[in-house]
Image: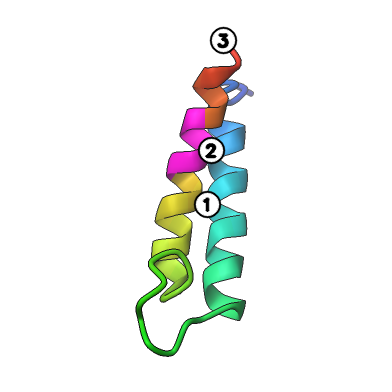
């Protein structure tokens, strides 16, 4: 069994947490870009996870 590269885990965590935040904290007006939809929350969370994964190197 091959293991995941170390940078994938923060990306997956960020994507999952961002999707949950976007799903449960939806903004009805659409003016808040992070929580307007679940997939935007997942996208922002994944990008933040990527940044945090490579910031520690």
Q: Residues within 10 Å of mark 3 (few under 14, many from 20)?
A: few
Q: Alpha carbon of mark 2 to alpha carbon of mark 3: how far?
A: 13 Å
Residue at the image point whose x is 53% and y is 64% from the top = 19
Most common secondary structure along the magenta stretch:
helix
User: Magenta stretch?
Assistant: 47-51
Eye-nearest disc, 1 or 3: 3
Q: Mark 3 highlights which residue?
A: 57
Q: Mark 1 highlights which residue?
A: 15
In front: 55, or 14?
Answer: 55
Q: Quadrant of residue 29?
A: bottom left
Residue at the image point whose x is 50% and y is 50% from the top = 45
**Residue 47 got which mark?**
none
Q: Are marks 1 and 2 in contact (CB under 8 Å)?
A: yes
Q: Mark 2 highlights which residue?
A: 49
Residue at the image point whose x is 41% and y is 66% from the top = 39
> Quarter of the image containing the C terminus?
top right
User: Viewed as shown, does residue 39 lie left or right of 2?
Assistant: left
């Amino acid at each position: 069994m091959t293991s995941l590269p170390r940078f994938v885990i923060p990306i997956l965590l960020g994507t999952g947490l961002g999707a949950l935040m976007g799903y449960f904290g939806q903004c009805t007006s659409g003016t808040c870009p992070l929580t307007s939809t679940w997939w935007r929350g997942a996208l922002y969370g994944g990008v933040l996870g990527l940044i945090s994964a490579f910031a520690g190197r």
